């Protein structure tokens, strides 16, 4: 398994990883309309733009992209960062790939300069992030709009 920086030519395959993961892993926690909207909001063009605003990484099994994650400044802050678009294909989950993506993001320059890292966590993934040391932002344990938790970690 190799973790490397995202390249523009990875966009379509990475968008497919996001779509497949949402359709399979997240479908028990969200209605089909929400899944479709989230897939549309993570198309290849959006992922390319996000990679230009932050640092996106992909996890590869040989030539195949099997996971992704992005770290970016939180609203342009020098002392806060945000993790975005963290997905691992369902058939690769449970193999430590998600943990490796998070650890890579946490060693990125945007994380190293940050006092605080935030992540909007899905209902599906909240316990995964909590296991990695992220806690509820401001102690709020209910999902925002019933769909996402706001988690954070301080350095």
Image (cartoon, rainbow, N blue to C red):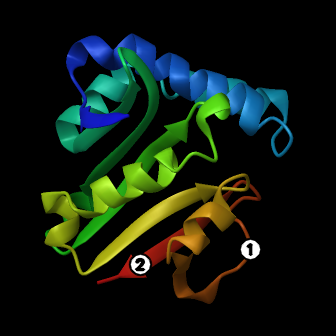
Q: Nearer the viewer, residue 94 or 155?
A: 94
Quadrant showing the C terminus: bottom left
Single out the residue that lies furthest toward the bottom. 139
Q: Earlier in the sequence, mark 2 or mark 1?
A: 1
Q: Secondary structure at mark 2?
A: strand
Could you tell me which residue is drawn at 20 percent across and 41 percent down?
A: 53
Where residue 96 appears, x then y in whole percent?
Answer: 52, 50
Where residue 12 appears, x then y in whole percent?
Answer: 41, 11
Q: Nearer the viewer, residue 68 or 110?
A: 68
**Residue assigned mark 2:** 153
Could you tell me which residue is drawn at 22 percent across and 43 percent down?
A: 55
Where residue 66 appears, x then y in whole percent?
Answer: 48, 27
Location of residue 147 with respect to 114 vertically, above or below: above
Is residue 115 something one can see in this rendering? Answer: yes
Q: Nearer the viewer, residue 103 or 36?
A: 103
Where residue 97 appears, x then y in whole percent?
Answer: 48, 45
Which numbered disc, 2 or 1, marks the residue closer to the eye?
Answer: 2
Location of residue 76 with respect to 14 vertically, above or below: below
**In this picture, residue 152 sits left or right of residue 79:** right
Q: Secondary structure at mark 1?
A: loop
Is residue 43 something one can see in this rendering? Answer: no
Quadrant showing the N terminus: top left
**In this picture, residue 10 sits left or right of residue 35:** left
**Residue assigned mark 1:** 142
Q: CA distance from mark 2 to mark 1?
A: 17 Å
């Amino acid at each position: 398994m190799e973790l490397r920086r995202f390249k523009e030519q990875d966009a379509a395959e990475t968008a497919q990883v996001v779509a497949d993961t949402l359709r399979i892993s997240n479908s028990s926690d969200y209605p089909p309309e929400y899944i479709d909207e989230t897939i549309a909001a993570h198309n290849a063009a959006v992922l390319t733009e996000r990679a230009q605003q932050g640092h996106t990484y992909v996890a590869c099994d040989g030539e195949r992209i099997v996971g992704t994650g992005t770290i970016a400044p939180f609203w342009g802050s020098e002392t806060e960062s945000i993790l975005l678009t963290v997905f691992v294909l369902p058939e690769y989950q449970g193999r430590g790939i998600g943990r490796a993506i998070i650890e890579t993001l946490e060693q990125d320059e945007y994380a190293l300069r940050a006092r605080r890292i935030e992540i909007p966590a899905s209902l599906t993934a909240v316990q995964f992030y909590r296991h990695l040391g992220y806690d509820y932002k401001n102690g709020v344990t209910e999902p925002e709009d019933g769909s996402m938790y706001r988690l954070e970690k301080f350095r």
